[in-house]
Amino acid sequence: MKTGKYKKPVLLVLVLALVGSLCYRAGRAEGAGGGVPGSAGDPLVTRSYLEERLSETGGGSASRFSKVVLSRGEGLSLYSGSELILYSGSAAVTGAAGLVSLTTGELFKRGNSVVRYHLYFAPEDGCGILADAGVTVYVRGDYSKKN
């Protein structure tokens, strides 16, 4: 009986199994396939997670985001130090000083379109947005709606 005939295929299978095992272990060590959805290990953000995090009530009213819905043509005027996140719809920046995107560090001047999911900061009273269409925003700080 010849035993040399089966040595190469068996050796190939063993090498492939070893390489596959090493790849699997390396992936697990890097966190692939692990982590709780929405956690730092798996940062996929769902709509319900975002709404829950933005409307949390802990930490007092100064740290709470309020959901504000605007119709086309309605405006939102922020007071100095207030923050805003555009969640849905489209809007343009209003106010002489504009809004600062804390997400990118850019200044959005009056008339610029607001980018969805960016965090904006009002540098002075009277800065805000004007809704081009139905808009949902989250606001932290003082604001007033304009018709």
Image (cartoon, rainbow, N blue to C red):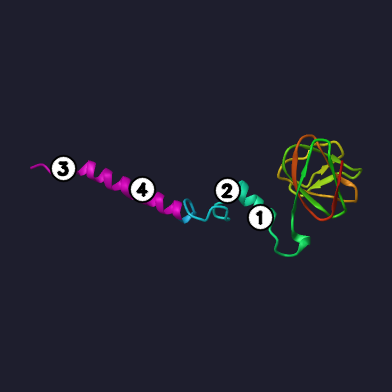
* In this picture, residue 111 sits left or right of residue 58: right
Residue under circle 3? 4
Which is more N-terminal, label 2 or label 3? 3
Residue in the picture at 57% in, 48% down:
44
Closer to us: 82 or 42: 82
Secondary structure found at label 2: loop
Residue in the picture at 36% in, 48% down:
19
Q: Position of residue 135 (x, y in %)?
A: 75, 40
Which is more N-terminal, label 2 or label 4? 4
Which is more N-terminal, label 1 or label 3? 3
The answer to whether marks 1 and 4 mark residues whose Cβ atoms lie closer than 8 Å is no
* In this picture, residue 144 sits left or right of residue 52: right
Residue in the picture at 75% in, 64% down:
60
Q: Which of the 4 quarters of the picture holds residue 52?
A: bottom right
Residue under circle 4? 19
The answer to whether marks 3 and 1 mark residues whose Cβ atoms lie closer than 8 Å is no
Neighbor class of circle 4 (other Cα within 10 Å; few <14, some 14-19, many 20+) is few
Secondary structure found at label 3: loop
Q: Which residues are magenta?
A: 1-28
Which is more N-terminal, label 3 or label 4? 3
Alpha carbon of mark 1 to alpha carbon of mark 2: how far?
14 Å
Alpha carbon of mark 4 to alpha carbon of mark 3: how far?
23 Å
For residue 8: magenta?
A: yes
Secondary structure found at label 1: helix
Residue under circle 2? 44
The answer to whether marks 1 and 2 mark residues whose Cβ atoms lie closer than 8 Å is no
Residue under circle 1? 53
